[in-house]
Image (cartoon, grey):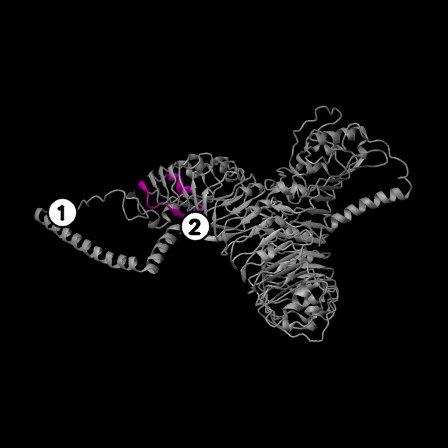
């Protein structure tokens, strides 16, 4: 798809330049750079941070028309500034420093708007943080501040997109750009600019507007009309626009491209859309749209792209869409569609993309559905109830580049092996049992991206050589030993299969060429022996995941040669010994998970500044919590639970800036993007929170020091870590009180202080922790009334038991004794008789309780299964509401 209008704008400007050259005006040297323009550009440079020297040619001694990214007309006036930052290489997702560390940064000086003849300004994909109107231009006397100048700019194209750190809270400066036709602000934070729609409608010439992922929340759904008289291209995708589709959109009669994907639009697709007669691209994917796909969409004779994937659409695919002879791209993947695939789709000779997978389609799919689709390049097909009935002698009129299949028996697709141009193959929930293994792997060797998930493939992989760049073979029932890899393989995941044997045949054989493997994931299979000591051959690795195997021995020293490593996950094995000192060479490590092993010794203090998740739980580490941890300012997950740590908690945890709300980011994913492939490979993380162990893609802010031997008071600094979502300090020997500052931890979802020696009252401020879904304060020395408020009263009594001086709901113990009723008549002998009766009643209840208690507890004591189930029930009930 691409952003083709942008390319049209650039082409138009280049065409003008070509015409000038064709007239012979390029044969002589243009006049020297206009002095005023030169001073403005030097002022702009003065406000920037330029870590890679992009502007090294911008010198006062040189002609500015010769500077990098600066273009002038024949009079020496600056007409074009093009300074996009190139990031066409692998970069870390979730760490902006890796992506743009070499790009321009700092604040954008608005004096650029004073360049009288500037038509084109591209500062995209850099690391700018703000546009600062207060910046001065000392030593640049010619320059007058744009904020003070009332002059209008002649700018036609402005591209600030993909400056992911850039925050703009006021767009009123755009009023000075009445000639603006192309505006691209993708990825900029416009959350605070609530008047964006009103401001942008004041640009009379605006033809293309792209606001993808700008954190917009309001789209003015009640507004009937927006004055975008010239608008042809509109992209509002990837925001948080939670409403029905706004009516003003359907009055944009000149619109040809509309992208509203990745929002939360609700309701049905309105018929008012018919007002936009020239629409050729309609993208509504990743919303909450419901109802039918309307029949009237078949009236859009110029429609080329119709993308409705990932919604809640029901009913069948309308037959009328088969009349859209211009249709190139039709995607309805991941809806709730029923019925059959219309047979007349086979007449759409221009169709290039057909994606109908992940629905509830039924009926027969045969060669008749594809009879004339000779241009088809991408096909996604598969529902549990579809029946395939292809002529065994049929040869498709197309050669696919991208094929996604689900719920198929490969034997029923005789045309499958005729596809020799595939770059991408994804198959899941399918049968390979009758396929010749050698035939399949030989055919698949040239496929760039091979993803096979949850299929029936009981194949022995011991002698297989894999060649694809991306190989994703998860949960397929593969058996035998590990396959071998060619140097072409960059991503390899073969987790959750029935493989066995050693890692050595895969890792320790010599390659004739340097390997390119970056992602190695071999988890939850049946590996035996230890981790081989031959990692020096795999220095390109960014991610190693060997969790959930039966690996023994120690971490080999050669793993320290993986200096580019970002993620190392060796959890849930039988590894032992200390963490080797050689790992200190892996200073780029962001994730280190060694949980559920038998590692021992002290926790080292060499962890690098890039560390995001440090997980060492359930080992045999001893000694103090190292103070080095406080210097890991980007840490999000810190899990040292279930070890033998002693001493006090560090009082410097406030230095972990990522755990303070002002510095914290949400929806955190960590991974990397692979050059040439474009996919994001995310490193998941296994977290123990709310009493459950779950695998997360989005990281939570977690501290877990539970089940150690820590003593002393909980440092006050802990309660100022306002981004924390889960805090577990249970099963230690901590003492002191819970301070009022805990009420500042507004993001807390899980809190466990159980089995310590905490005293004093539960602070009233805890009742304002509205996200708290799991709480355990049991078995301490807490006193007084449980603070009133629905938050703390919503938990069960099990969350507070073991605090004998604690009272109030939900405990049965009242905080004050009930006073006798005023109309109660007490008569001497009658009162005495009542007291004696109560004594006998209490004695009988006590005896009965004791007998019942020992019958139940005795059974629990002698029956291990019952005993385990009982304590798990207590833990589960206490940990969540």
Q: Position of residue 181 (x, y in %)?
A: 74, 44
Q: Which residue is mark 1?
A: 825
Left or right of 297 on screen, residue 585: left
Which secondary structure, mark 1? loop
Which secondary structure, mark 2? loop
Q: Which residue is mark 2?
A: 690
Report the front residue among 758 and 334: 758
- How busy is the neighbourhood of tag 1: few (under 14 within 10 Å), some, or many (20 plus)? few
Q: Position of residue 804 (x, y in %)?
A: 28, 44
Magenta-drawn segment: 763-785
- How busy is the neighbourhood of tag 2: few (under 14 within 10 Å), some, or many (20 plus)? many
Q: Position of residue 225 (x, y in %)?
A: 66, 49
Left or right of 391 on screen, residue 863: left
Q: Position of residue 266 (x, y in %)?
A: 57, 55
Residue 592 covered by magenta stretch: no
Quadrant in which residue 376 is drawn? bottom right
Task: Classify 140 as above or below 461.
Answer: above
Residue 783 covered by magenta stretch: yes
Quadrant placement of the N terminus: bottom right
Left or right of 846 on screen, residue 134: right
Report the front residue among 166 and 115: 166
**Residue 682 got which mark?**
none
Q: Residue 241: in sight, yes or no?
A: no
Report the front residue among 268 and 68: 68
Instruction: Compute the Cα span from label 1 to label 2.
Output: 52 Å
Task: Classify 612 as above or below 403.
Answer: above
Check contact, mark 1 vs mark 2: CB within 8 A: no
Q: Nearer the viewer, mark 1 or mark 2?
A: 2
Q: Residue 235: in sight, yes or no?
A: yes
Q: Earlier in the sequence, mark 1 or mark 2?
A: 2
């Amino acid at each position: 798809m691409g952003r083709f209008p942008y390319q049209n704008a650039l082409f138009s400007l280049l065409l003008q330049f070509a015409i000038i050259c064709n007239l012979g005006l390029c044969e002589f040297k243009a006049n020297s750079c206009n002095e005023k323009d030169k001073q403005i550009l030097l002022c702009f440079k003065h406000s920037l941070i330029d870590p890679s020297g992009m502007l090294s040619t911008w010198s006062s001694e040189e002609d500015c028309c010769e500077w990098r990214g600066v273009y002038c007309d024949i009079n020496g006036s600056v007409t074009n500034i093009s300074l996009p930052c190139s990031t066409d290489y692998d970069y870390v997702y979730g760490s902006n420093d890796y992506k743009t560390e070499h790009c321009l940064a700092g604040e954008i000086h608005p004096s650029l708007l004073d360049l009288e003849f500037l038509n084109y300004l591209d500062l995209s994909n850099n690391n700018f943080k703000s546009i600062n109107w207060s910046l001065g231009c000392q030593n640049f006397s010619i320059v007058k501040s744009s904020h003070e100048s009332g002059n209008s700019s002649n700018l036609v194209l402005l591209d600030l997109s993909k400056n992911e750190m850039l925050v703009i809270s006021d767009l009123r400066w755009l009023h000075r750009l009445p000639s603006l036709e192309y505006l691209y602000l993708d990825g900029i934070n416009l959350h605070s600019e609530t008047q964006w729609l009103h401001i942008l409608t004041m640009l009379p010439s605006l033809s293309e507007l792209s606001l993808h992922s700008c954190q917009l929340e309001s789209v003015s759904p009640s507004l009937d009309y927006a004055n975008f008289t010239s608008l042809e291209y509109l992209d509002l995708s990837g925001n948080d626009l939670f409403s029905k589709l706004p009516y003003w959109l359907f009055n944009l009669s000149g619109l040809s491209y509309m992208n509203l994907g990745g929002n939360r639009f609700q309701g049905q697709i309105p018929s008012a859309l018919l007002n936009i007669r020239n629409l050729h691209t309609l993208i509504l994917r990743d919303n909450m749209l419901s109802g039918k796909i309307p029949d009237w969409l078949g009236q859009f004779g110029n429609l080329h792209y119709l993308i409705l994937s990932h919604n809640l659409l029901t009913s069948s695919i309308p037959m009328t869409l088969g009349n859209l002879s211009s249709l190139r791209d039709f995607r309805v993947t991941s809806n709730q569609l029923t019925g059959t695939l219309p047979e007349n789709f086979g007449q759409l000779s221009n169709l290039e993309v057909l994606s109908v997978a992940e629905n509830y389609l039924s009926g027969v799919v045969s060669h008749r559905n594809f009879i004339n689709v000779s241009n088809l390049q991408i096909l996604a097909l598969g529902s549990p109830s579809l029946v395939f009935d292809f002529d065994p002698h049929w040869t498709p009129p197309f050669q696919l580049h991208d094929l996604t299949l689900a719920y198929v028996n490969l034997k029923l697709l005789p045309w499958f092996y005729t596809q020799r141009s595939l770059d991408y193959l994804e198959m899941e929930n399918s049968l390979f049992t009758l396929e010749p293994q050698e035939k399949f792997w030989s055919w698949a060797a040239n496929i760039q991206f091979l993803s096979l998930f949850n299929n029936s493939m009981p194949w022995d992989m011991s002698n297989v050589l894999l060649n694809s760049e991306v190989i994703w073979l998860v949960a397929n029932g593969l058996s035998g030993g590990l396959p071998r890899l060619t140097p072409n393989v960059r991503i390899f995941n073969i987790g959750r299969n029935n493989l066995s044997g050693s890692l050595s045949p895969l890792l320790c054989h010599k390659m004739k060429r340097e390997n390119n493997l970056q992602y190695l994931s071999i988890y939850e299979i049946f590996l035996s022996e230890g981790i081989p000591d031959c990692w020096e051959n795999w220095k390109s690795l960014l991610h190693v995941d060997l969790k959930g195997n039966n690996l023994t021995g120690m971490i080999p020293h050669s793993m320290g040669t993986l200096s580019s490593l970002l993620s190392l996950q060796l959890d849930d094995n039988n590894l032992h010994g200390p963490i080797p000192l050689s790992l200190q060479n892996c200073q780029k490590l962001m994730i280190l998970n060694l949980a559920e092993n038998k590692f021992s010794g002290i926790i080292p203090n060499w962890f690098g500044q890039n560390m995001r998740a440090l997980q060492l739980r359930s080992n045999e580490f001893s000694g103090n919590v190292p103070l080095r941890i406080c210097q890991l300012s980007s840490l999000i997950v810190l899990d040292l639970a279930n070890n033998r740590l002693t001493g006090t908690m560090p009082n410097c945890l406030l230095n972990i800036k990522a755990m303070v709300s002002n510095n914290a980011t949400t929806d955190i994913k960590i991974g990397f993007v692979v050059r040439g492939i474009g996919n994001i490979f995310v490193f998941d993380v296994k977290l123990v929170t709310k009493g459950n162990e779950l695998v997360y893609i989005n990281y939570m802010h977690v501290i877990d020091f539970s089940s150690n031997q820590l003593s002393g008071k909980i440092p006050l600094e802990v309660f100022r870590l306002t981004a924390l979502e889960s805090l577990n300090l249970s099963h230690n020997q901590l003492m002191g009180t819970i301070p009022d500052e805990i009420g500042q931890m507004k993001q807390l979802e899980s809190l466990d202080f159980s089995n310590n020696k905490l005293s004093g009252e539960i602070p009233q401020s805890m009742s304002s922790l509205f996200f708290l879904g799991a709480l355990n304060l049991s078995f301490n020395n807490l006193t007084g009334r449980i603070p009133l408020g629905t938050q703390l009263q919503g938990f069960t009594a099990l969350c507070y038991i073991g605090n004998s001086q604690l009272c109030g709901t939900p405990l049965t113990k009242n905080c004050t004794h009930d006073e006798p009723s005023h109309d109660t008549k007490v008569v001497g002998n009658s009162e005495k008789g009542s007291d004696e009766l109560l004594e006998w009643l209490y004695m009988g209840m006590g005896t009965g309780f004791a007998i019942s208690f020992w019958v139940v507890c005795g059974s629990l004591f002698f029956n291990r299964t019952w005993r385990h189930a009982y304590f798990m029930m207590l833990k589960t009930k206490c940990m969540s509401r």
